[in-house]
Image (cartoon, grey):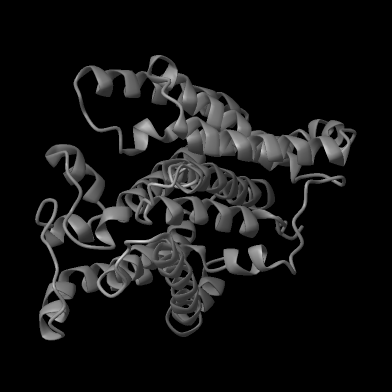
Amino acid sequence: MSRTHFHTFDAMRFFAFLLVFLLHLPKTNIPYIDFFLKSGSIGVIFFFVLSGFLITYILLYEKQNRGSISLKKFFARRILRIWPLFYLLVAFAYLSPYLLRLFHIPFENQGYEPRLWVSLLFAENYMMMITDQFPDGAPLRVMWSICIEEHFYILWGILFYLLPVKRIFPLSLCCILLAHIVRLIYAYYDIAPIDLFTHLDYFAFGAIPAYLFMYKKHTIEQLNKIPKAVKYLFALITLGVVFTIPNLEWEQIEYLFPLLWGILFSVCILFTLGSNPLRISNNSWLTKLGLYTYGLYLYHTIIILLLLKFIPVLQFSQWLLLSASALLLTILVSIISYRVFEKPFLRLKKHFY
């Protein structure tokens, strides 16, 4: 039995990146533009739900077809995917002040002074929690989510290695409950909720459709009976909610939003499965660009900040020029990075299956 290739997922990843990218653009003070620039944190949540699905599927597939999980091989594959580019850009972050001075490009020191050992150990999110600030320098400011991903790989790999398959669904439900409790505790003590345990429910919401896909085929067959038009309508409603919620002042129910995002994104994933799926073609530019999402996510803040040094954003036309230039340059750099730097490491993954 060969592993399933999940169509539409690369397109979904690119959409999640686009939400983050829009958040990091300068604001325009034009309401109908700024309306779309506030959903970046939801893009990160979508990343986590997608990751929860894919990692859960990979681990369940290995457990089902080989009888057990090789943690050594699983962690080796994750290392080859995450570490090379991560550490390359950590090095860039620490060298960038010297490069900016060398080329006489002005820069400001904002946030806490990063510590190398913290960055190397995937602990940037914990330093942000302790200092209640962002680290000084791009792309360290977006690496908190990569740290959470790395912590998730470790926890999920160990749990799936130890637990029988029948415990996976209850585990996911417990993780959803645990994350809500931890968020309440952190809110009471005024601690920034940017660790694995305050995001564990998003990964668990992704894990549920993976479990259903592997072990509850009758559920997937029931989904096939839902008209495709209904699935696309649900996706459009989800898209509208993603852009609308950040523009509303609903502090009194903000603790319900994680549940909302988890359910919406989990259902969207379910609708891409089966024989009558919600589908974005593998030939679409969204899908093709989704292949480079990891690089897009790590490079985009560097490029936006660099272009801001040369393109003053005083008028809408300048904002448009900056946005288009930053997106195109980010895509170009990410494609080159993937093909020249990341791909040689990815080829090594074949030795760990």
Camera-nearest residue between 115 and 302: 302
Q: Quadrant of the N terminus?
A: bottom right
Identify whether 128 is placed above or below 183. Answer: below
> How many numbered discs sit on the rendered protein?
0
- Residue 164 visible in the shown view: no
The quadrant where residue 164 appears: top right
Identify whether 250 is placed above or below 214. Answer: above
Measuring from the top left, give residue 311's x and y in whole percent. 32, 72
The residue at the point 89 percent across, 36 percent down is 227
In the displayed structure image, the side of residue 101 where residue 241 appears, left or right: right
The residue at the point 48 percent across, 25 percent down is 257
Camera-nearest residue between 325 and 212: 325
The residue at the point 32 percent across, 54 percent down is 142
- Residue 128 visible in the shown view: yes
Measuring from the top left, give residue 16's x and y in whole percent. 53, 51
Q: Quadrant of the C terminus?
A: bottom right
In the displayed structure image, the side of residue 91 where residue 279 appears, left or right: right
